[in-house]
Image: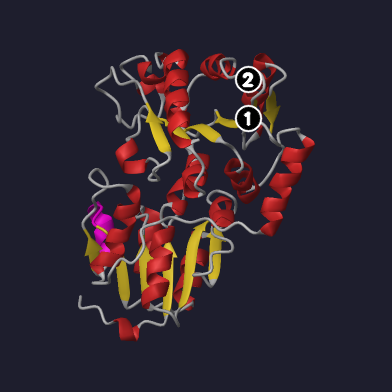
Amino acid sequence: MQFDKNRVNKILIIKQGAIGDVLLSTPVIENMRHHFPEAEINYLTQSYCREVLMGNPYLNRVLTYDIGKGDSSYCLIRNIHDQKYELIIDLFGNPRTAIITFNSDAKYRVGFRFGWRALAYNIRVKPRGGEVHNVEFNLDAVRALGLEVISNTPKIYLNGVHTEFADMFFNSAGLNGREVIGFNPSGTWPTKVWYPEKWIELGKMFPKDSRILLFWGYDKEKETAEKIRSAIGENAVLIPEVNLKYMAALIKKCNLFVTNDTGPMHFSWITGTNTAAIFGPTNSHLQGPLNKNSIVLKNESLSCLGCNLTQITECPNSHKCMKELDAAIIYGKLMEFMRLHS
């Protein structure tokens, strides 16, 4: 279909989740605002991702829904239809988002050619998920409209309240004036998580006058973080329960943030923090940090890295990518990295 930007006044961007994926889609928002300065631009995502989009100056509204929490798919479809969008960009392309897009009655419906879901769109994008970074994958939807990409930098917008909270916490926890190394031992996929005993071993290698700041998001993650803190000893500190932007503000104050491949990893490099990202079953070239002050840590001895197996029971190689990732080698790489970026 021939796209006429002059016929577009109301735009919806859809990305169901997850937190990191939503963050990596933010350049699409900025590019659309550049090309449609007067349009209403909204974003549809799951409720737990809402916070990372709040305060984005290029958005008018963030619309949310919950899967499996009583939300009616019919009501959601009807709601989007009744809002009369001229352009919908579906960056997710699962059955739910494809059906929402197809039933929107939007003149222009942009989406990726994923099986039968391609039928939901009249401007179809070749998916390059295994070829380019997720940022560029998302921006292909902008290119499919014949629009120039003017920014490919993801952003999260913190305000003075978030910064003040982080400053107060660092002061109360005695972190000011010390080298603070953030540890994020959490992760959604079991195969993406480095073992707690490895984090403990690594934490004990840092000088006693430094501080290890342990991050967590959910109750089970807190249990793991507390176990690691207790084993490392008095120079380890646990962050309080915070929402995503307060977490990002705490990460930004760290001298170094060591993390599994998960949402907070993206908070770190997007805010300019020195980032050390541990990768195993996922591909850092497709999903890893893009800033210059970052390093990817992985078990280079394996040829099966990037397998994308989500459960340890699926792994035919006994999860060696994490199990045999040596803490002493990681510490040496971190020291060399910090010498270059301190």
Within 10 Å of the Cα at label 2, are there few (<14), some (14-19), or many (20+) other Cα atoms? many
Q: Residue at coordinates 76% horizontally, 34% vertically from top-left?
A: 173
Q: How is the image coloured?
A: secondary structure
Q: Is residue 30 left or right of residue 199?
A: left
Q: Amino acid at mark 2?
A: Ile
Q: Is residue 152 left or right of residue 207?
A: left
Residue 220: in sight, yes or no? yes
* Furthest residue toward right: 172
Helix, strand or loop for disc 2:
helix
* Residue 114 among magenta residues: yes
Specify the label residue 228 is tagged with.
Answer: 2
Task: Name above or below for residue 304 compared with residue 261.
Answer: above
Specify the label residue 244 is tagged with.
Answer: none
Q: Position of residue 115 (x, y in %)?
A: 23, 52
Residue 103: in sight, yes or no? no
Q: Position of residue 34 (x, y in %)?
A: 39, 74
Task: Name above or below for residue 113 compared with residue 193.
Answer: below
Most frequent secondary structure within the magenta stretch: helix
Q: Amino acid at mark 1?
A: Leu
Q: Residue at coordinates 52% horizontally, 49% vertically from top-left?
A: 271
Q: Earlier in the sequence, mark 1 or mark 2?
A: 1
Helix, strand or loop for disc 1:
strand
* Residue 246 among magenta residues: no
Q: Which residues are magenta?
A: 113-119
Q: Position of residue 128 (x, y in %)?
A: 23, 50
Q: Residue at coordinates 62% horizontally, 37% vertically from top-left?
A: 217
Q: Is residue 47 left or right of residue 20?
A: right
Q: Which residue is mark 1?
A: 214
Q: Quadrant of the N terminus?
A: bottom left
Q: Is residue 342 left or right of residue 305?
A: right
